[in-house]
Image (cartoon, rainbow, N blue to C red):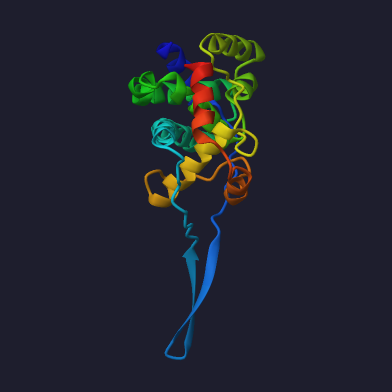
């Protein structure tokens, strides 16, 4: 099973697309120094209320999922960064044969760099990674494989993934999916405290609206339901 996860996750670096750059919000602040005006641009600072839990069990469940998200997110970020780099490199390559050759060269490099680490991913971490690929690229693994390899490959890869209760069609919808919201909550808090490096998503996310929508979420119940279904 681990070899299979490694195989299709390592396919991420060879999928090429244009990534939208989203600028961080800035706050203008006017400071008066000796009768002179100085306009400074300050980075937006998010202040979070401490997350509270109804029980120690809920806390344990949350931080179990927290570790899984922290393990998966860096791979999704690396994939998005590498894809942007590949796009820039391919702009000057017109020959389809040379483009395929260059892509294979990058894939081989990525396999050498991350093969051992990807093999260590659990099914939960692989499942989260598939969702985060959609968060960072705006496309599912299934769609990317279909577009840049073939529909036949996408079908068989997804059929094999289904044997392990994984889906290459996984999408990221924190507005309607409770577990996706928990992932987003972990990401936003980790960005704020510096334990994860922020990368703008390709999908629209209004975190503070999500907080309002999910204010009554039962974290223990949602994660327990996930465990019962997949583990």
Closer to the camera, 213 or 72? 213
Question: Most extreme residue toward the front, as rendered?
Answer: 55
Q: Quadrant of the N terminus?
A: top left
Residue 41 is at least partly visible in this image: yes
Q: Residue at x 52, y 33 (%)?
A: 132
Q: Residue at x 37, y 45 (%)?
A: 195
Q: Position of residue 14 (x, y in %)?
A: 51, 25
Closer to the camera, 196 or 64? 64
Residue 91 is at least partly visible in this image: no
Q: Residue at x 43, y 17 (%)?
A: 6
Q: Which image quarter: residue 155?
A: top right
On screen, residue 208 above or below 61:
below
Left-right relation of 28 to 125: right
Q: Residue at x 64, y 23 (%)?
A: 143
Closer to the camera, 122 or 7? 122
Please state the total of marks drawn on the protein image. 0
On screen, residue 25 above or below 107:
below
Q: Position of residue 169 (x, y in %)?
A: 62, 22
Left-right relation of 158 to 67: right
Q: Position of residue 112 (x, y in %)?
A: 35, 22
Question: Most extreme residue toward the bottom, as rendered?
Answer: 35
On screen, residue 67 above or below 142:
below
Closer to the camera, 142 or 104? 142
Q: Position of residue 145 (x, y in %)?
A: 59, 20
């Amino acid at each position: 099973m681990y070899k299979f996860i490694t195989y299709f996750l390592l396919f991420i670096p060879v999928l090429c697309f244009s990534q939208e750059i989203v600028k961080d919000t800035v706050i203008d602040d006017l400071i008066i120094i000796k009768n002179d005006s100085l306009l400074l641009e300050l980075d937006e600072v998010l202040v979070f209320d401490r997350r509270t839990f109804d029980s120690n069990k809920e806390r344990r469940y949350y931080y179990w999922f927290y570790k899984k998200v922290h393990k998966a997110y860096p791979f999704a970020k690396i994939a998005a960064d590498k894809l942007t780099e590949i796009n820039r490199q391919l702009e000057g390559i017109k020959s389809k044969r040379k483009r395929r050759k260059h892509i294979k060269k990058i894939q081989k490099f990525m396999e050498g760099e991350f093969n051992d680490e990807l093999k260590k991913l659990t099914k939960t971490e692989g499942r989260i990674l598939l969702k985060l690929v959609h968060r960072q690229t705006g496309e599912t693994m299934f769609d990317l494989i279909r577009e840049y390899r073939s529909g036949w490959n996408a079908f068989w890869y997804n059929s094999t993934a289904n044997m392990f209760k994984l889906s290459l069609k996984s999408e990221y919808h924190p507005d309607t999916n409770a577990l996706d919201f928990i992932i987003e909550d972990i990401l936003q808090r980790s960005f704020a405290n510096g334990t994860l490096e922020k990368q703008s998503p390709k999908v629209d996310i209004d975190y503070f609206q999500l907080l309002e929508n999910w204010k009554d979420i039962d974290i223990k119940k949602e994660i327990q339901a996930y465990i019962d279904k997949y583990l």
